[in-house]
Amino acid sequence: MINIQNIDFTYKKGKKKVYTDFSAHIEAGGIYGLLGRNGTGKSTLLYIICGLLHPQKGACTLDGIDTSARMAETLKDIFLVPEEFELPATSMRRYVEINKPFYPNFSEELLDYCLSAFDLDRTVQLGELSMGMKKKAFISFALATNTRVLLMDEPTNGLDIPSKSQFRKALASAASEERAIVISTHQVKDVEQLLDQFIIIESDGLLVQSSAADITEKFRFDMHDLSYADDNELYSRPSFSGKETISLNTSGEDTPINLDLLFTALIEKPELAKYLNNEK
Amino acid sequence: MNFKQNIPIYLQIADRIMDEILTGVYPVNGRIPSVREYSVALEVNVNTMVKVYDHLTSSGLIYIKRGLGYFVSESAPAQIRQMRKTQFFTDFLPQLAEKMQQLGITEEDLKKELTKYLNK
C-alpha cells in the first residue's frame, strides 16, 4: 500500500540529512508502532508519508501514486493527527459538516462511538477545549474518516490515564483489514498491546521493520534471578527482583514482547537488529 | 488488563475466558463476544484475539456457527476443570513440594493447616 523507496531528506541544504536512502513499507490491516529516540525523524517520516514534506531523492507512494503530488485521490485516503494542532472556533457538528466531504468513507457511526468513548458529543465547541479534550475530539474525527492510511504523531501525549484506555478502545474499534494505522510514540506502554507491526528508526535510518509475530518467533523476553546465565542471552537489564532479558527463542514458545526493553536493547546494541531484519 | 511476564498473552486471555465459562458468565451453548468486541474490551490487537479464539476452538472449548459467532461447547466446563486439575498436579504441586522442603514443612504440618480451609 505505502511504499517508501530510497528517500533522502534534509530540512536545509548542507545540513545533516534526516534520512539517507531510507526504505520502508506499510500494508493494510496493520497497526504500526513508529519508534525512535527524540530527533530521529519520526514526525518527519509521517509528514513525508502524507505528502507535506517532499524527499529530495526517492519517493513515497500510495498504491503507486507519489504522495508528494498531493492528488485528491491520495489525500482522501490519508489522514494525519499531528502532535500539536489548532482547531477552529466552531462546534464539532459544524466541523464535521465542513470536513467530512473530503473523506468518502467517513463513518458517522464510528464518530459517535469514538466521541462517546471519550465522553464527548457533537455539541462541543472546539475552540474552547483544553489541550487533552481537543486531542480527543480530533482523534475521534480522524478515526471516523476511515481513510486507508491514518497517521498519528504521539496521540497519547496530553491524555490523562482514563483517556488513554478510552483511546485504546476507540483505536481497536476503528482498526480494520482495509486500514493501516501508524502511531509514533515514546509512550510504548500506552499502546503496545495494540501494535502488530514495528518500524524502529535511529539517527542513521531504519533500524528494524518487523511484525510482532516475527519478534516473538526470534526473541524471548524473560525475568530471571541475577545469577541466571544462558548462552542464548542477547541483552539484559537490571530489574527490581533480578534482571529482564532478551534471548534467542530456541524453544518456539511465545513470550509477551517487552517493547520497552527491546527498544533500549536495539539502541544500545544495534547489531541485534540483524536477527529481526534477515529473511523478509 | 494487566498481563504477566512470560506467559503468552493469548494464553492469559484464553484463561480468563475459561474462568468466565466456569463461573457461568458464558453458559454452555451461549454466545461469547465476537473477536472484535473482546479485543476492544481488553484493548488488544484483533490478531491477538483471533489467536485466542483459534486456541479455544482447537481445544474444543468453543465452536463457531457460521455467520452467528462463537459458542461455548457442551463439554467445556468439565474439560476446563479437568485441564486445571492436571495443571494443579503438574505445575502447582511440584512448586509446593519444593517450598515445603525448603522450609522444612512436613506432610503432617500441611495436613493440619489444610483442614482449616477445606472444612470451611
Image (spheres, rainbow, N blue to C red):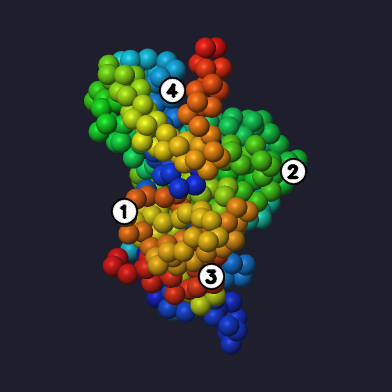
**Residue A193 drawn at (x, y percent):** 48, 46
Please give the label number shown on residue A252.
Answer: 1
Q: Which residue is mark 2?
A: A130
**Residue B105 drawn at (x, y percent):** 53, 34
In the displayed image of the protein, which residue is found farthest to the top?
B120
Q: Is residue A184 left or right of residue B38?
A: right
User: Label 2 neighbourhood size at 10 Å, few (<14), some (14-19), many (20+)?
Assistant: few
Label 3, label 1: how far apart the Cα atoms are: 25 Å
Whether residue A81 appears in this view of the structure is no
Residue contact between numbered discs 4 and 3, judged by CB atoms under 8 Å: no
Rendered residue at 50%/32% (across/down):
B106
Label located before the other in sequence (1 or 2): 2
Q: Nearer the viewer, mark 4 or mark 3?
A: 4
Q: Which residue is mark 4?
A: B20
Label located before the other in sequence (3 or 1): 1
Type of amino acid at the residue the image marks with label 3: Ile
Label 4, label 3: how far apart the Cα atoms are: 41 Å
As rendered, which of A57 and B120 lies closer to the eye? B120
Q: Is residue B7 left or right of residue A203?
A: left
Q: Which residue is mark 3?
A: A267
Chain identity of mark 1? A
Give the secondary structure at mark 4.
Answer: helix
